[in-house]
Amino acid sequence: MEFELKILGSASATPFLDRHHTAQVLTVNGTPYLIDCGEGTQRRLLDQKLRPQRLQTIFISHLHGDHFFGLFGLLGTMNLTGRTEPLRLFGPAGLDEVLTTQMRHSHSQLNFALEFTAVDTTAHQLIFEDKNLTVHSLPMRHRVPCCGYLFREKPKRRRLLADQLPDGLVPAQLTALTQGEDLLDEAGQVLVRNAAVTAEPKRARSYAFCSDTLYTETLANLVQGVDLLYHEATFLDDMRERAAVTHHSTARQAGLLARRAEVQQLLIGHFSSRYRDLQPLLTEAQAQFPWTSLAVEGLTFSVAE
Amino acid sequence: MEFELKILGSASATPFLDRHHTAQVLTVNGTPYLIDCGEGTQRRLLDQKLRPQRLQTIFISHLHGDHFFGLFGLLGTMNLTGRTEPLRLFGPAGLDEVLTTQMRHSHSQLNFALEFTAVDTTAHQLIFEDKNLTVHSLPMRHRVPCCGYLFREKPKRRRLLADQLPDGLVPAQLTALTQGEDLLDEAGQVLVRNAAVTAEPKRARSYAFCSDTLYTETLANLVQGVDLLYHEATFLDDMRERAAVTHHSTARQAGLLARRAEVQQLLIGHFSSRYRDLQPLLTEAQAQFPWTSLAVEGLTFSVAE
């Protein structure tokens, strides 16, 4: 099953002709999760043939417009097109007030339950879990309360080796085997040894979304070894003072963090509109961490099972 | 000088791949006025090479998302790109609260003055005037407080006939002539007869923006004889009951109103996403009023002097 990240926008605050504001869709085993929702995200979803009604969960990092102004329109469209299924929304406190103020003045009422959870942006903790994955908050250091999100697949079960299995096992026994148990007879003696008929489970894949933030070394501990790390890289390193003032990172810093965290792959984005050509940002990050890609519009990054 | 309307969006609430939410730019004598600001309007402005910083005045009809969700991002971009010049904003009461709630939570502060005027959407009255034009509100009948806007060029001065003018007139005398006065000598005798050296002024052009609204016959009195009338035509007339329930109009009703109001040209827009092909809407309106056009993305409608 897929574990796949689709990039809908790579721009930072000032828009740019062919770049859009931050929005990403992580799809895990058929379930899409929307991460951030800059202005125009509903149109990007249409472009990518991702039906908004399929979304069940949305994660917003912070309340700067380039990360959530598309949410108003997306919710409106979900409503107009007949949604009745609940929608889970995670984000900093205040997002609910922004939404309800707007809905009050438009005399709007959602015909579906919007289940908002205010995320403590200063804590690293479990905030959500479903059949596919767990999601932990990642404290970012930005000008407003801001958090990243760490998505981890649930631990998987051991795989049955069909040609090694004895005949006649019942479903409960097969389940026990995928959970790593030996099968015992009534006397408690081993009937089927787990290691003989099962293989190691497929590994649980992971994705860490880190935007917007100052370069923060301790973040490396929280995202250690993830398969995919998205880290903002608003500026080149010759603008690191500007990055510090605005609470953003440079491409070099993103690369450094990926190296420290020993991730498999780094994606950089949230590029300042001053960079028409993104190659220097990529080159700078790759000098620290070779396995870096530009997370630009329309690209999909898959993690193999 | 131009009097020109550029259409940035023709869609009603549910978006559609190649249609955008309502936004229009009326340009009069070099000054652009933005009318409504659906999601993505800042990008449409970029596409049309209209720099947001040139906008001094924005008119919002009502607080349904497809008419103003682009305002958040547009103001943000103006701010980020260094605007210091004041911006005038007209719209229904409540728009200011929606904006300030959002700005409070994003810890944002505009570096320019946003001069908001709450428009009484039930009254037909002068709400704005500058060197180019006057703007009157037009009461709409919609599910929420909503008003259209009537833009009229200021009455123009008489035109001087250069080859009829005597030599030696001073600027103050020329100005008096353009204002329709005769020039008198010290004894009060007519020195230069106005009618002999001036021609009728160019006529003052006008544009009425009417969206969203139930078909309302009395509106014809308020927009009588305008050069350009934009009237919403969300549905075909076979859906007039649906139009009545949702407080919208049909293409036939838009045509009827244009005929009653004896306008020069009718533009229809705000099309329901159920209509992939817009020709039936155009045909239906033209059956009532032949001088009808579809107001679709990218089109510009000019009124000659």
Image (cartoon, coloured by chain):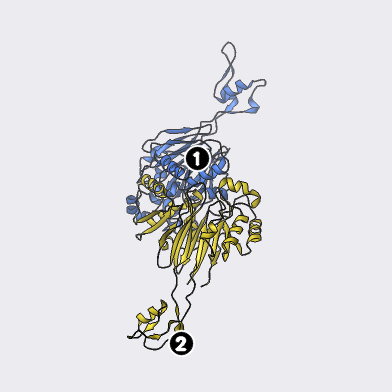
Chain colours: A yellow, B blue
Residue at the top extreme?
B187
Task: Label 1: state its secondary structure.
Answer: loop
Subunit bearing disc 1: B
- Percent from the top left, x then y, of residue B3? 54, 40
Q: Is residue A228 left or right of residue B93?
A: right
Residue at screen point 61% across, 65% down? A291
Q: Is residue B44 left or right of residue A82?
A: right
Q: Which amino acid type is marked by label 2?
A: Asp
Q: Is residue A115 left or right of residue A256?
A: left
Residue at screen point 59% across, 51% down? A272
Q: Nearer the viewer, residue A36 or A146?
A: A146
- Percent from the top left, x then y, of residue B293? 48, 50
Residue at the bottom extreme?
A167
Q: Which amino acid type is marked by label 1?
A: Gln
Residue topped by disc 2: A163
> Are the numbered discs 1 and 2 placed on the same chain, yes or no?
no
Residue topped by disc 1: B109
Q: Nearer the viewer, residue B195 or B87?
A: B87
- Percent from the top left, x then y, of residue A47? 50, 61
Q: Nearer the viewer, residue A302 or B40?
A: A302
Q: CA distance from mark 1 to mark 2?
A: 67 Å
